[in-house]
Image (cartoon, rainbow, N blue to C red):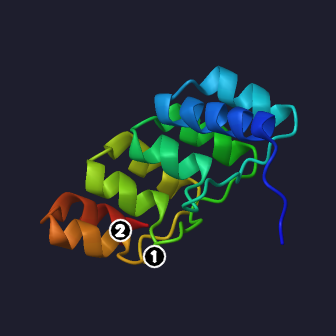
Amino acid sequence: MSEAPDPEVVELATKIFDLARQGRTEALVAYVDAGVPADLTNDRGDSLVMLAAYHGHAEAVRALLARGAQADRVNDRGQTPLAGAVFKGETDVIEVLLEHGADPAAGTPSAVDTARMFAKADLLELFGAH
């Protein structure tokens, strides 16, 4: 039997996930620099990088990766931040993730599979260059 989470901790975590979704890089990294894990995940396994990537915030993604977050961390559905960025058409985020070693073949569906699904030949070419 596990204890119910502390409501104040849940409130803080919710605030931090919202900062990632909103791309509020300065506030987000202040929490990470103060000790919040750069790979913090929510109840669906979405990391801060995933949330920032999916919502198109390249600078937040870059800052989190610079602080040790994993570029290829999969969520509970097997999705990676790179595949999410491909799905959303976030080219700047895709470039940042690739610069930090994201694997276009990781996850289900992978970024490669997602690019094929949406006939994004330019991204398939970009992935081939990495």
- Residue 9 lies, with reference to residue 113, above or below; the image says above
Amino acid type shown at disc 1: Gly
Q: What residue do we see at 51% from left, 29% from top? A: 23
- Residue 52 lies, with reference to residue 109, above or below; the image says above
Question: Residue 108: image x %, image y %?
Answer: 40, 78
Q: What residue do we see at 31% from left, 73% from top? A: 112
Q: What residue sits right under mark 1 in the picture? A: 107
Amino acid type shown at disc 2: Ala
Q: What residue do we see at 87% from left, 32% from top? A: 34
Judging depth in this view, the residue of 94 and 122 nearest the camera is 94
> What mark, if any, has residue 122 been given in the picture?
none
When asked about the image quadrant of residue 36, the answer is: top right
| Secondary structure beneath label 1 | loop
Question: Residue 18: image x %, image y %?
Answer: 55, 33
The N terminus: image quadrant: bottom right
Tell me: 43 left or right of 35. Answer: left
- Residue 42 lies, with reference to residue 13, above or below; the image says below
| Secondary structure beneath label 2 | helix
Tell me: 87 left or right of 98. Answer: left
When asked about the image quadrant of residue 91, the answer is: top left
Q: What residue sits right under mark 2 in the picture? A: 111
Question: Residue 75: image x %, image y %?
Answer: 53, 66
Task: Give neighbour class at mark 2: few <14, some 14-19, many 20+ (Cα, 10 Å).
Answer: many
Query: CA gap, disc 1 to disc 2?
Result: 8 Å
